Image (cartoon, rainbow, N blue to C red):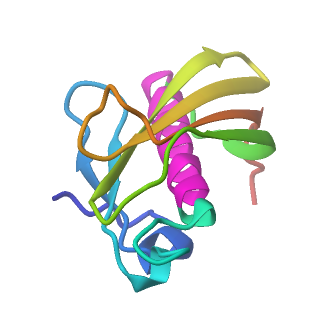
């Protein structure tokens, strides 16, 4: 597994790691543990949402770097659709930038466990893109 030191403290607290970034946006993995459990044996919805958000942010930063940009982003809104309960398995997520404009980015993120074609949740996020200020 590839550990990305730039993951925020929340992601590190939940043991999220980048497990693949060769052929597109980074795939983020989160192991099942007590700290991400909601009702017994199931992932907490907040942990799933957090995983989706981290995957979306990683995808945006990758897309911005590909354009030669180091712009900052600010989340505008998030919608999460929970499709099935997350069980006691490793959970993965990947973000896909569906639109990267000059000032806004739209991202879809998908979380799954054993089968990438059977997501447990989908996230739809919009981010404001702003140039970093000097000094």
User: Residue 49's spot in the image, x, y percent?
Assistant: 60, 54
19 to 31, vertically: above or below: above
| Front in this rendered view, residue 2 or 14 | 14
| Front in this rendered view, residue 114 or 135 | 114
103 to 114, vertically: above or below: above
Q: Residue at x 54, y 75 (%)?
A: 39
> Any magenta on residue 94?
no
| Front in this rendered view, residue 69 or 73 | 73
In the drawing, does residue 70 fall left or right of residue 66? right
User: Residue 54's spot in the image, x, y percent?
Assistant: 52, 52
Give, as a single range, the part of the protein colored magenta.
48-67
User: Residue 28's spot in the image, x, y percent?
Assistant: 35, 50
Q: Residue furthest bottom?
A: 34
In the drawing, does residue 49 fall left or right of residue 76? left
Magenta stretch: helix, strand or loop mostly: helix
Q: Residue furthest right?
A: 76
Quarter occupied by the N terminus: bottom left
């Amino acid at each position: 597994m590839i550990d990305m030191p730039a993951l925020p403290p929340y992601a590190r607290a939940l043991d999220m790691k980048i497990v693949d970034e060769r052929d597109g946006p980074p795939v983020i993995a989160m192991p099942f543990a007590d700290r991400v459990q909601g009702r017994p044996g199931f992932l907490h919805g907040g942990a799933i949402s957090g995983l989706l958000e981290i995957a979306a942010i990683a995808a945006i930063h990758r897309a911005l770097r590909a354009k030669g940009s180091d712009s900052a982003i600010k989340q505008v809104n998030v919608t999460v659709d929970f499709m099935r309960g997350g069980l006691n398995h490793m959970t993965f997520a990947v973000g896909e930038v569906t639109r990267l404009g000059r000032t806004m980015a739209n991202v879809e993120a998908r979380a799954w466990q054993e089968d990438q074609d059977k997501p447990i949740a989908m996230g739809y996020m919009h981010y404001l893109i702003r140039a970093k200020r000097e000094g």
